[in-house]
Image (cartoon, coloured by chain):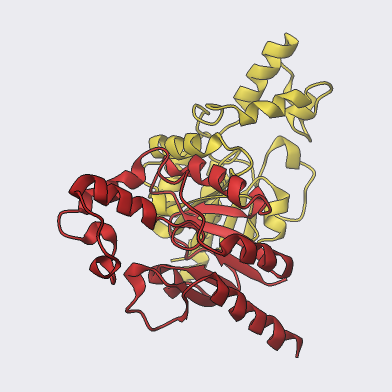
Chain colours: A red, B yellow
Amino acid sequence: MKRIALDMDEVIADVYPKFLDYYERDFGFRPKREDYWGKKVYELEGAMHIRKYLFEPGFFRDLPVMEGSQEVVKWLNEHYDIYVVTSAMEFRNSLIDKRDWLEEHFPFIHWKKVIMCGDKSVINADYMIDDHVRNLVTFNGKGLLYTATHNTEETRFSRVDNWKEVRTFFENELKNESI
Amino acid sequence: MKRIALDMDEVIADVYPKFLDYYERDFGFRPKREDYWGKKVYELEGAMHIRKYLFEPGFFRDLPVMEGSQEVVKWLNEHYDIYVVTSAMEFRNSLIDKRDWLEEHFPFIHWKKVIMCGDKSVINADYMIDDHVRNLVTFNGKGLLYTATHNTEETRFSRVDNWKEVRTFFENELKNESI
């Protein structure tokens, strides 16, 4: 069974609603999508302190699930060896939150298949689905770039905009393998 | 720079003094080394409940550092790309404890180089130092078995009994590479 390394934040966990809530709380208005397209919300003028909220206990515990990801990951799990690989180590308090979040929303992924790391260059898999170019650049398999505001200019990797496209991509892979 | 995947428990963190403390508390005497040689302390008769203490918050936070490991890992770190790779995911409460323990005792290992996982078959490195045969069996590099009570019968891997032997092994590797 081929192996897929699956990122969490901005791939199966949607960080943006929370970022935008914090921004609105601190600045009195909600930025429009086009304002932060091409970057991160905390890269907007005067908003760098928002990144610090990532270090708070609970930040990662109640993030919404990325639309469509549960169903597609469940389907993928029947055809591939799925590992969740998340760059969690920078954020001490995220570790337990992320584990609990996965157990709640992706209970079909066994704890043996969860990896919390710093850099991902050490991960050996056939596919990686990630929103960070830095993770795909050092990856030795096929990288799929999951569209996020900060990677819109990137052209080096196959791009998926949503989980419907992820499913279509792997349906084609399975079809090609069986030919 | 070649990469070493370095295990924590029973390799750089000494779990046994704590296991023996719990055993003594619960049974009224401290088992002798020969009693649990060839197995784990909690595999002694009636002691399986001791494994449950691994799930308690704090269990992994105050373990003693394995003798000689700090100095040798510091030295290794100058010659190799060191990743700490620990099977932590089963024990929810160990995650933050292990991160804090590493920061205290191995502050020269950057958080980017720490990996908490379930199974280690996904780790790509040149060397792995581990006390568990199951991790070395699936490893694609050179495995070094760090002697622990539960692996004394194993003969398939190069064995190291202590950190002095680890240093000697890698001094020879470096010497051979430079020839």
Nearer to me, A29 or B77: A29
Q: Position of residue B158 (x, y in %)?
A: 68, 54
Q: Residue furthest top?
A: B28
Residue B68 in view in this figure: no
Relative to A132, residue B14 above or below: above
Nearer to me, A79 or A85: A79
Residue, x 54% and y 46% (percent of image)? A101
Q: Position of residue B147 (x, y in %)?
A: 67, 42
Q: Position of residue B166 (x, y in %)?
A: 55, 48
Q: Residue furthest left?
A: A46
Residue B69 in view in this figure: yes
Quarter of the image where the N terminus of chain A is located: bottom right
Residue B141: quadrant of the picture: bottom right
Residue, x 62% and y 67% (percent of image)? A72
Q: Residue furthest bottom?
A: A179
* Count of number-bearing discs: 0
Quarter of the image where the C terminus of chain A is located: bottom right
Residue A155: quadrant of the picture: bottom left
Relative to B129, residue A162 above or below: below
Q: Position of residue A89 (x, y in %)?
A: 43, 49
Q: Is residue A161 left or right of residue B43?
A: left
Q: Is residue A110 left or right of residue B100?
A: right
Q: Is residue B20 left or right of residue A143?
A: right
Residue, x 51% and y 52% (percent of image)? A116
Relative to A82, residue A62 above or below: above
Residue, x 59% and y 39% (percent of image)? B9
Q: Residue furthest right?
A: B45
